[in-house]
């Protein structure tokens, strides 16, 4: 732990550490030397983790050196990564904690101390990630749904409460707080860990794909499978191929009228075209400082859209400003800034600062990002706002179709006068009669809702109004959005323009709009006018909003307000005023459009600070129902044999100090013969439990009615339900059956049975089973039960043409061998019917990607590849999977 080098450009901040002499850290910047200075920031985090966790066994010195040599080793070596913490959500958290409780039982039975079984890695579990909707009528929706969820899931919640009391190093976030990725971002993120005065970067893995959001805060993190996550909780590192890092250089200045959503969607489009799948993305360049933390986290959250593992924004001055408003005190901010600068994990805003070297660079000019609307009939038909007037004119001219209305030239300038509420108005083609500000899907970023509010404020102050016949409405997507609008003081101005809060939920874009005034409807029909609706939703099909509104445009929330004020879409905002304000002055859109600086200032100083204060108070206060919930405090969980939610699984029943070597698989039958692209949802569905399924039969035998079945996702703490639910997807296509059905053939008897029933017979007969599959086996979400379920069905190996990488790791983690056909071979080319019996011999000196021979009962012999990528995976497999491997350490 050397002191920082002198002469650093960050010397002033580094000097601040002298005020905290008790703080220690590994100065990886000095240790790495010149090579470290060229590393991408995200790889520097991996390097620091390897140095800090180097124990000569799980993490070796050569691993750290490989990371330091990233430039030549990327894509060629696998390295371990020990994240600083783990985030679980409820559906994946319940099986993880049940496994920990079962591990305590096994350790006790094997003569060990069960109290020693605790997460080694700090873990946070959010209870409220998922919500089953029972009531949809506002305003009682929230309270009633929460009450139903609490009652329905009481057993699960009591188990979580027990877990929070007896396990060390785990924090349970109670119900009615928020979803995993949002709470992770708003409350759990540290940026820099300070444990017993030792500093190191925050990093995280989670069981949710949205974990990538935290990269917008400069925290390295991504989603992984449940079994891998449990191994990390127990102190095991993740193993990943040293990735390519694509540098995304942002240059230029953002257009004044471009919203956060325009920026996010444009960058997403560029990255999708750049083929960044399976890579890290890291942002740099002069344009990065123009992006707020909200923008950055939204871009990072879009990783599934463009396939990157993560999109990393190094900490910079924008991040620090956000952290200040988020509640970091002065001392914590000082230490955070000084430490990150000392180890060169802080991005310097100065253009002269040296950028890291990247695998490739993608350039995005922010200047090229312009605002768009979509319409007039389909969401995929985009129109640049500065072309809106000419495009609408073209729509009037075009033949009737996906864009055209075929209005005769002599009728295109028709004007229809109408009397409404004592005043006369003039309607024409393009007149706006519906304007709805909706916080929906990609418009859920509260900053764009705030932009609409600030624009409304400026419009009212300038003397602009919205014509009273226009059906205006405001439907925030959540209470947080309402908080944004209320705390910033813009809600009254939206109200003055007619944008009153109508409630939470789908409204205008699904056609739930109050009827237009009769006089307006008659005028539109009389003149055969192309009247318009403008909304910030997702659906704009012709006639959906109202049968007399034929043109519908999707726009950002501030543009909805702007078009409502203008009263028409047939306008060029650059050259034509929105309307007349006080003293007869013409007011243009540019006069009232909030600048990004104004938006960021209000957001950070007035909204975010109050929002985080409210969140922390809520977290400290807790949930009343949760606080009153009783749960035992015993070291071992008192399993209720009658429970249909929580059951002790059998994963650790044979736990012993010494692991038995893998046995040969002899005369195995094929349980299922599957094709290509079998997803984890085919293997372990998360939704409703079909009434005719094996799981339903089990629950019925326990006295439950179909109304009480709940879902597979909610019952992941009961292995009896989940094992019966394995391969229970009604869309499963098993070649033995020939049609979609969760069925298979039990070959010794010739019976067609539910998959569980066939597997149960095979196990009673002592016959092992395997699975045959095609390409991309295990696609989809990283569901741990997609590996655990087959294991409990007695599956010893999967033989497929190719695997989804995360699922392959999950199979190894539970003790199932992933075997792969050689290139160009598959069951068809080898003449396999699946009705044969298969024997597989595993040599004692099993090596990564070793070729193994398989013999069939028909005399055929063929070779396959044992798809273990490194010696650590082989070690885990030989020990019966990662969970058993780590559990033995407690003995």
Image (cartoon, rainbow, N blue to C red):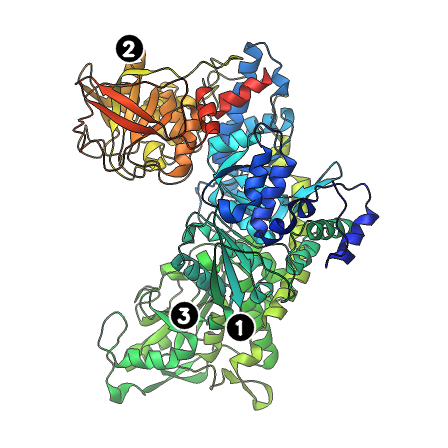
Q: Quick check: can you spot residue 122? A: yes
The CA distance from mark 1 to mark 2 is 75 Å
Q: From the image, which quarter does the N terminus lie in? A: top right
Specify which label sits upstream in the sequence, 1 or 2: 1
Instruction: Establish if 635 lies above or below 278.
Output: above
Q: Residue 749's spot in the image, x, y percent?
A: 19, 14
The CA distance from mark 1 to mark 3 is 21 Å
Q: From the image, which quarter does the C terminus lie in? A: top right
Q: Nearer the viewer, residue 614 or 826?
A: 826
- Secondary element type, mark 3: strand
- Secondary element type, mark 1: loop
- Kindly identify which residue carries mark 3: 373
Q: Nearer the viewer, residue 52 or 465?
A: 52
- Kindly identify which residue carries mark 2: 765
Which of labels 1 and 2 is toward the front? 2
The CA distance from mark 3 to mark 2 is 64 Å
Specify which label sits upstream in the sequence, 1 or 3: 3
Instruction: Establish if 583 lies above or below 18.
Output: below
1 and 3 marks in contact (CB < 8 Å): no
What is the number of callouts on the image?
Answer: 3
Question: Which label number is shown at residue 497?
Answer: 1
Q: For the point 52% across and 53% down, which residue is it?
A: 478
Q: Residue 446's spot in the image, x, y percent?
A: 55, 59
Instruction: Establish if 193 lies above or below 742.
Output: below
């Amino acid at each position: 732990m050397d002191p920082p080098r002198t002469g650093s450009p960050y010397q002033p901040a580094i000097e601040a550490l002298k005020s905290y002499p008790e703080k220690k850290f590994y100065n990886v910047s000095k240790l790495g030397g010149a090579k470290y200075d060229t590393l991408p920031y995200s790889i520097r985090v991996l390097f620091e983790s390897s140095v800090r966790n180097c124990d000569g066994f799980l993490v070796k010195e050569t691993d750290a050196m490989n990371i330091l040599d990233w430039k030549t080793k990327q894509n060629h070596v696998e390295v371990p990564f020990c994240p600083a913490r783990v985030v679980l959500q409820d559906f994946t958290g319940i099986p993880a904690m049940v496994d920990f409780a079962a591990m305590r039982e096994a350790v006790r039975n094997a003569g060990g101390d069960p109290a020693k079984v605790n997460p080694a890695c700090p873990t946070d579990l959010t209870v409220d990630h998922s919500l089953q909707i029972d009531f949809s009528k506002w305003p009682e929706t929230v309270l009633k749904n929460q009450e139903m969820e609490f009652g329905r899931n009481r057993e699960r919640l009591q188990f979580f409460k027990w877990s929070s009391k007896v396990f060390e190093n785990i924090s349970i976030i109670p119900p009615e707080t928020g979803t995993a990725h949002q709470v992770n971002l708003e409350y759990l993120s540290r940026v820099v860990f300070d444990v017993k005065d030792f500093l190191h970067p925050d990093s995280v893995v989670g069981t949710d794909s949205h974990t990538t959001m935290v990269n917008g805060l400069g925290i390295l993190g991504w989603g992984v499978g449940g079994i891998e996550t449990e191994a990390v909780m127990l102190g095991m590192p993740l193993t990943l191929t040293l990735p390519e890092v694509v540098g995304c250089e942002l240059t230029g200045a953002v257009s004044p009228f471009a919203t956060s959503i325009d920026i996010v969607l444009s960058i997403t489009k560029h990255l999708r075209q750049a083929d960044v799948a399976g890579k890290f993305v890291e942002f740099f360049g002069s344009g990065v400082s123009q992006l707020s933390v909200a923008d950055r986290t939204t871009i990072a959250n879009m990783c599934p859209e463009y396939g990157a593992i993560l999109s990393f924004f190094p900490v910079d001055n924008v991040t620090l400003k956000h952290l200040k408003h988020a509640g970091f005190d002065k001392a914590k901010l000082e230490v955070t800034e000084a430490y990150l600068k000392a180890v060169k994990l802080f991005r310097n805003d100065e253009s002269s600062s040296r950028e890291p070297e990247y695998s490739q660079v993608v350039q995005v000019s922010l200047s090229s990002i312009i605002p768009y609307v979509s319409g007039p009939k389909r969401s995929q038909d985009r129109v640049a706002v500065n072309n809106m007037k000419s495009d609408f004119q073209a729509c009037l001219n075009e033949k009737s179709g996906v864009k055209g209305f075929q209005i005769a030239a002599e009728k295109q300038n028709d004007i229809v006068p109408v009397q409404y509420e004592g005043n006369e108005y003039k309607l024409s083609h393009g007149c706006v009669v519906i304007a709805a500000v909706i916080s929906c899907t990609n418009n859920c970023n509260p900053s764009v809702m705030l932009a609409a509010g600030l624009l409304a404020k400026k419009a009212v102050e300038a003397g602009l109004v919205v014509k009273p016949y226009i059906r205006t409405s405001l439907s925030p997507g959540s209470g947080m959005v309402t908080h944004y609008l209320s705390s910033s003081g813009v809600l009254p101005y939206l109200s003055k323009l007619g944008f009153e809060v109508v409630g939470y939920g789908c409204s205008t874009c699904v056609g739930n709009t109050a009827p237009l005034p009769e006089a307006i409807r008659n005028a539109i029909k009389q003149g055969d006018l192309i009247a318009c609706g403008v909304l910030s939703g997702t659906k704009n099909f012709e006639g959906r909003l109202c049968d007399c509104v034929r043109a519908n445009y999707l726009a950002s929330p501030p543009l909805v307000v702007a078009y409502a004020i203008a009263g028409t879409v047939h306008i060029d905002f650059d050259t034509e005023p929105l309307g007349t304000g006080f003293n007869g002055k013409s007011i243009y859109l540019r006069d009232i459009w909030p600048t990004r600086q104004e938006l960021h200032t209000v957001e950070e100083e007035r909204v975010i600070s109050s929002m985080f204060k409210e969140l922390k108070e809520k977290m400290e206060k807790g949930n009343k129902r949760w606080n009153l919930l009783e749960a035992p405090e015993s070291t071992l969980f008192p399993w209720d044999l009658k429970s249909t939610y929580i059951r002790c699984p059998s994963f650790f029943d044979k736990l012993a100090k010494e692991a038995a070597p893998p046995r040969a698989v002899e005369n195995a039958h094929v349980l299922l013969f599957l094709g290509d692209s079998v997803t984890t949802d085919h293997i372990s569905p998360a939704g409703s439990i079909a009434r005719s399924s094996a799981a339903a039969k089990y629950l019925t035998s326990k006295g439950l009615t179909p109304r009480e079945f709940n879902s597979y996702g909610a019952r992941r703490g009961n292995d009896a339900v989940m094992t019966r639910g394995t391969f229970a997807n009604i869309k499963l296509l098993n070649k033995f059956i020939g049609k979609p059905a969760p069925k298979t053939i039990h070959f010794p008897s010739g019976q067609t049975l539910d998959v569980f029933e066939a597997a149960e017979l095979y196990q009673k007969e002592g016959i092992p089973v395997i699975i045959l599959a095609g390409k991309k086996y295990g696609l989809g979400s990283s569901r741990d039960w997609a590996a655990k379920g087959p294991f409990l069905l007695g599956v010893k190996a999967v033989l497929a043409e190719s695997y989804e990488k995360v699922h392959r790791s999950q199979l190894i983690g539970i003790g199932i061998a992933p075997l792969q056909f050689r290139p160009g071979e598959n069951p068809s080319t080898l003449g396999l019917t699946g009705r044969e019996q298969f024997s597989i011999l595993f040599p004692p000196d099993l090596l990564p990607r070793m070729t193994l021979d398989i013999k069939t009962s028909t005399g055929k012999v063929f070779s396959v590849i044992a798809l273990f990528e490194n010696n650590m995976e082989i070690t885990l497999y030989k020990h019966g999977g990662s969970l058993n491997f780590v559990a033995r350490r407690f003995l």
